[in-house]
Image (spheres, rainbow, N blue to C red):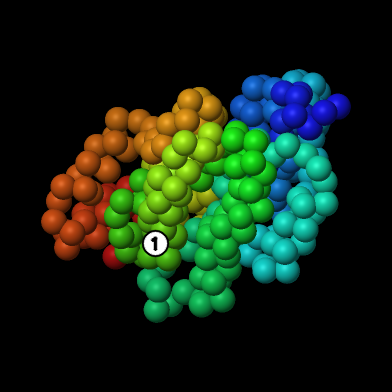
Amino acid sequence: MSPETDAARWAIITGASSGIGKALAFEFAAGGFNVLLIARNRAALAEVAAECSDKYRVETEVVLADLSRMDSIDTLITSLASKPRRYEVLVNNAGFGIHGDFASTDIEQNIQLLNVQLTAALRLIKAVLPSMLSRRSGRILNIASVYSYSPVPFQSVYGACKAFLLSFSSSLQNELKGTGVSVTVFCPGVTQTEFRSRAGIGEKRQDSGMTAQAAAHIAYVETMRGKHVVVPGFLNRLFVLFAQVLPGWSVPSLVRFINRQRGQNHS
């Protein structure tokens, strides 16, 4: 099969074993993309890959990688370069959260968060972008957050990473104008995934927010359209509006108040 045929298009998806990443794997498989799925959980990845293959008749590959580790990122990049594939889509979705005041959280865990959210994303973009540019075709989807627009007390490093992703994505999109390569940055709010419980973030209602499937569908559709910034849901867009128009000094206090009302376990 020629690497330039539509059937040979591949989508790389990090954090594909659960949540939005898993739902995005199904979206891209349904769209006819072969999927390369990256995460740490072998059993969960294998299950997602099997469903993509059985239901949508696409090729799949599972890659176990701990993106918090530099050596694991290096191994992943080497693996991608070793195969002559048409990587048409890159989805940087992998991430985790740390909840607590910065003075009390573990610095090594914070550095691991930077690696997963930022280092891995930058390295992967660097790995696939040259071939996208040479064939004038490609899509990059970076999963950010409504927190990209505001400082987040008690999730300070996570919020800063998402702000970086938004700024970087916007700069990269401008650099790539006219090249045939688009950059979409997806900024969801509260989503019904395992993310919040894994980060130690309490919620009054566990069923609040958008489902991972609904969020992923919007992200897929808008990425394929080439839209740049996507904030799904009226309340999320309202939050972003307030974060942009209120005085900068007031936004962290507003976020802290909102999170307290949602039952998150900090003062």
Residue 181 occupies quadrant: top right
Q: Nearer the viewer, residue 179 or 90?
A: 179
Q: Residues within 10 Å of mark 1 (few under 14, many from 20)?
A: some
User: Number of callouts in the render?
Assistant: 1
Residue plotted at (55% across, 41% down): 140
Q: Which residue is mark 1?
A: 160
Q: Residue 9 location in percent, x, y?
A: 72, 31
At 63% from the left and 64% from the top, the residue drawn is: 68
What amino acid type is highlighted by mark number 1? Ala
161 with respect to 52 (left or right): left
Q: Quadrant of residue 230?
A: top left
* Residue closest to the eye, 103 or 112: 112
Residue positioned 33% across, 59% down in the render: 152
On the rendered image, what quadrant is the C terminus found in? bottom left
83 to the left or right of 121: right
Can residue 3 be spotted in the picture?
yes
In the current view of this chain or complex, which residue is farthest to the left?
A: 247
- Image coordinates for residue 67, horizontal then vertical, percent: 65, 60
Answer with left or right where residue 245 lies relative to residue 184. Answer: left
Residue 96 on image: x %, y %: 54, 56
Question: Considering only vertical position in the picture, is 16 above or below 168?
Answer: above
- Quadrant containing the N terminus in the rendered view: top right
